Image: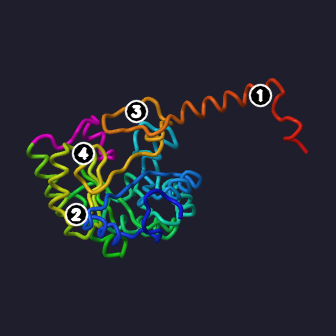
């Protein structure tokens, strides 16, 4: 059986994630944006693959997540779904596709689900988008919430600093988390908030709480695949652990290929027809 520490090779569902929380089993979540990477991530035993709007940064080189379009997110999600056998695939709804009105949001949500065949969607925000969340849930589409540092609102925040350090914002975050659970969300991502606050939310909610820069007392963790594999060099937040240095490995391999081509060492007699 493929995967590390995987006791159950069945397809992961939202119901199984809730069971994992009840049983005290941590949830592993990682981003992927293409078929080849998703195949590797899934075979390693990942519980959840997030087709994040971070594709705007990682795949397209944009400074923020805001420019990525609905069509582009569907393209990435399709590729990931084709590669995935076990993990639950969650796709971000990109900026502008659910902020206008609930009716348009449901139309966009249905399009993502129908065209990509992903398992669920992720939306940023709390009570401000609650009507939209309810409408999408009413359409039978599972939703993962996202609170704390919400990158789609970076122009409002003006900084990527830790959120909810002040009492008022912390209280609102807790209230928002409860509202999302009561509306029917199957999980909530908490990004870059104090660990103590994240632990409080995880203890109060019956649905899984996934952290990124939110400490270890939550129900699971998510990272961007290119960051944790060391393919990116300039991004070094405190919460990021690099598990490899693929930038160096790839640069060395590509450099060797260039040398071999220019010296006529590649291809050799055994590598031609």
- Residue that badge 4 annotates: 215
Colour scheme: rainbow
For marks 3 and 1, give the CA distance.
Answer: 32 Å
Q: Decide which of tag 4 and tag 1 comes sooner along the chain.
A: 4
Residue 132 to residue 214: above or below? below
Q: What secondary structure is found at the residue carrying circle 4?
A: loop
Q: Which residues are magenta?
A: 150-166
Residue 207 percent coordinates (x, y): 24, 65
For marks 4 and 1, give the CA distance.
Answer: 46 Å
Q: What secondary structure is found at the residue carrying circle 3?
A: loop
Q: Decide which of tag 3 and tag 1 comes sooner along the chain.
A: 3
- Residue that badge 3 annotates: 235
- Residue that badge 1 annotates: 260
Q: Decide which of tag 2 and tag 1 comes sooner along the chain.
A: 2
Residue 20 percent coordinates (x, y): 31, 66
Q: What secondary structure is found at the residue carrying circle 1?
A: helix
**Residue at (36% x, 38% y) in the render:** 240
Label 3 with label 1: CB-CB less than 8 Å: no
Q: Decide which of tag 3 and tag 4 comes sooner along the chain.
A: 4
- Residue that badge 2 annotates: 180
Q: Decide which of tag 4 and tag 2 comes sooner along the chain.
A: 2
Binning the other alpha carbons within 10 Å of mark 1 as few (below 14), some (14 to 19) or many (20 upward) gives some
Residue 123 to residue 248: above or below? below
**Residue at (47% x, 34% y) in the render:** 232
- Of marks 3 and 1, the one in the foreground: 1
Residue 239 percent coordinates (x, y): 31, 39
């Amino acid at each position: 059986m493929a995967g590390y520490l995987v006791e159950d090779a069945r397809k992961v569902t939202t119901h199984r994630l809730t069971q994992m929380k009840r049983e005290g089993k941590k949830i592993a979540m990682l981003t992927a944006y293409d078929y080849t990477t998703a195949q590797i991530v899934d075979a390693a035993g990942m519980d959840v693959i997030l087709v994040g709007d971070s594709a705007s940064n990682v795949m397209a080189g944009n400074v923020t997540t805001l420019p990525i379009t609905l069509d582009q997110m569907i393209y990435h999600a399709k590729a990931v779904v084709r590669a995935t056998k076990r993990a639950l695939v969650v796709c971000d709804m990109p900026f502008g596709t659910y902020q206008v009105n609930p009716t348009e949001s449901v139309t966009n949500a249905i399009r993502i689900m129908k065209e990509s065949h992903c398992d669920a969607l992720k939306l940023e925000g709390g009570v401000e988008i609650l009507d939209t969340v309810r409408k999408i849930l009413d359409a039978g589409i599972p939703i993962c919430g996202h609170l704390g540092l919400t990158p789609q609102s970076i122009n409002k925040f003006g900084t990527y600093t830790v959120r909810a350090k002040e009492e008022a914002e912390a209280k609102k975050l807790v209230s928002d988390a409860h509202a999302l659970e009561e509306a029917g969300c199957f999980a909530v991502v908490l990004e870059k908030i104090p660990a103590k606050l994240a632990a409080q939310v995880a203890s109060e909610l019956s649905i899984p709480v996934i952290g990124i820069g939110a400490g270890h007392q939550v129900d699971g963790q998510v990272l961007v695949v290119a960051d944790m594999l060391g393919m990116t060099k300039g991004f070094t937040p405190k919460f990021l652990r690099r598990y490899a240095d693929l930038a160096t490995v790839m640069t060395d391999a590509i450099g060797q290929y260039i040398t071999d081509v220019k010296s006529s060492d590649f291809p050799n007699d055994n590598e031609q027809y």
